[in-house]
Amino acid sequence: MFNAPLPETQLLKTVLKPLLDDFQVWFGRTQTLLEEERLEFLESPEQESLLARIQRTRQEVSTAQALLDATDGQTGVETSVIVPWHQLVLECWQVGMRFHQQRSQNM
């Protein structure tokens, strides 16, 4: 059975809020990894660049979260903004997988 369609505000709270929370989790995990580990598979400038992009994006996501909260779900985020965030999450996942593979090979 299908649920009745949610009003836009409820839809934003139901979909966008958890998505932004997930972005923060994955960016935070990768930021910690990049700050605490030297990744052999990344050149130092690449690691620094990725860290800077993650830090900047976390601030953008925090701003979106604050606007969503301040407007009680009345403010959304354009897809053109979310797509690069999602691409960065995919990059974070790839870095995490490579790190764990590298670590397991070195044991």
Image (cartoon, helix red, strand yellow):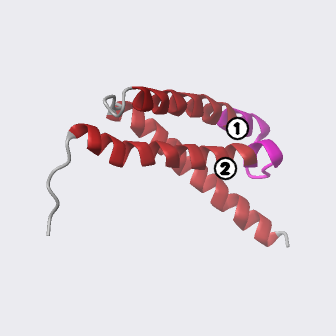
User: Does residue 38 appear anywhere in the picture?
Assistant: yes
Whether residue 62 sits left or right of residue 38 in the image: it is left
Residue 62 to residue 87: above or below: above
Q: What percent of the width, then of the height, locates residue 103?
A: 79, 65
Which region is colored magenta? 33-50
Question: Between residues 24 and 56, which one lies in front from this camera angle?
Answer: 24
Question: Which label lies toward us, 1 or 2?
Answer: 2
Name the residue rendered at 78%, 42% in the picture: 35
Give the main secondary structure of the magenta stretch.
helix
Whether residue 50 sits left or right of residue 89 in the image: it is right
Whether residue 105 sits left or right of residue 9 in the image: it is right
Q: Is residue 18 magenta?
A: no
Q: Which of the 4 quarters of the picture holds residue 94?
A: bottom right
State which quarter of the image contains the N terminus: bottom left
Q: What percent of the width, then of the height, locates residue 101?
A: 71, 67
Q: Residues within 10 Å of mark 2 (few under 14, many from 20)?
A: some
